[in-house]
Image (spheres, helix red, strand yellow):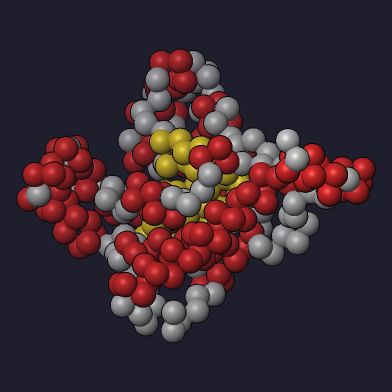
Amino acid sequence: MKKDIQINDFKVTEKIKLSEVSTTYDLDADEDKIEDELEDVREALGEFQNTIYAHGKYAVLICIQGMDTAGKDSLIREVFKDFNTRGIVVHSFKVPTDKELNHDYLWRHYIALPERGKFGVFNRTHYENVLVTRVHPYYILGEKLPNVNTVEDVNDAFWDKRFEQINNFEKHIAENGTLIFKFFLHLSKEEQKNRLLRRLEKPSKNWKFSPGDLKERKLWDNYQDCYEDAINRTSTLHAPWYTIPADDKPTARYIVAKILYDTLTQYKDIVEPELDADVKANLDQYINELENE
């Protein structure tokens, strides 16, 4: 790759305006080269996953958000395809079930958190609770919250409290060994239009389309405002947001993989455990025993 990416080009460390953040990024390479580089990085990530699994003291939580058609599913497939399945679990959060609505809104995310030594990927995340519900505040009424009886009760103070709860949730799990990455796949409205048209024009993609996609598209500006506010309020040292230019899928996948690898390998304490001294001292004996069966 001619152009080496810098993590800080994408990490949100100060307030941003999404309208001023580009949805494209030139890696100065053709698509085949980008695919080759992605393959190298994801293989390295897969190897490092084995080390994290053996080390067993950290969990890694990867949160992926983006507008419809931003490429969340394909990014997960392509970035993590070299992982050992025992070390990674992907959760795709849909509309809350009745059981989930009978708990607090973070409950279903908390119980899906990765164990130590494992990666967890949230395809849509706990941030849906300050995105979709903020664009459609009447959804909050289904949470059966005390003192929230009408949409008028879902006011600025309500959202302030919810952001505080999310920040506290992430701070708690980070302090207990979860490494958190939050990726916003930043898609342009024009590229979303093109991808929706492809879903309609290609029979093999028709199943992905819902008329609801067009209704939500009409609320594009509302969603952008909510994403911008959520990112600005919750990008922290222990749980940073990264805005990923998503108009070109191969580029977005490579950037995400590179950020993960470059950041995780900075943790020099993540190493495979040493063999017990007695076992190590008798390795030749065990080898001879097996060879002479």
- Image x and y of residue 88, in percent: 53, 41
Residue at x 58%, y 27% (from the top left corner): 111
Looking at this view, is 242 or 104 the one in front?
242
Residue at x 64%, y 35% (from the top left corner): 115
Classify the position of the C terminus by image quarter. Answer: top right
Residue at x 40%, y 20% (from the top left corner): 97
- Image x and y of residue 74, in percent: 34, 51
Q: How many marks?
A: 0
Residue 26: tell me if it is visible.
no
Residue 201: tell me if it is visible.
yes
In this picture, residue 201 sits left or right of residue 270: left
Classify the position of the N terminus by image quarter. Answer: bottom left
Looking at this view, is 243 or 220 the one in front?
243
In this picture, residue 167 sits left or right of residue 35: right
In this picture, residue 226 sits left or right of residue 218: right
Looking at this view, is 208 or 166 the one in front?
208
- Image x and y of residue 96, in percent: 40, 25
Decide: is 98 above or below 189: above
Decide: is 133 above or below 246: above
- Image x and y of residue 178, in percent: 67, 44
Residue at x 48%, y 52% (from the top left corner): 82
> In the current view of this chain or complex, which residue is farthest to the front?
292
Give the quarter of the image for residue 33. bottom left
Give the quarter of the image for residue 7. bottom right
In this picture, residue 201 sits left or right of residue 194: left
Give the quarter of the image for residue 30. bottom left
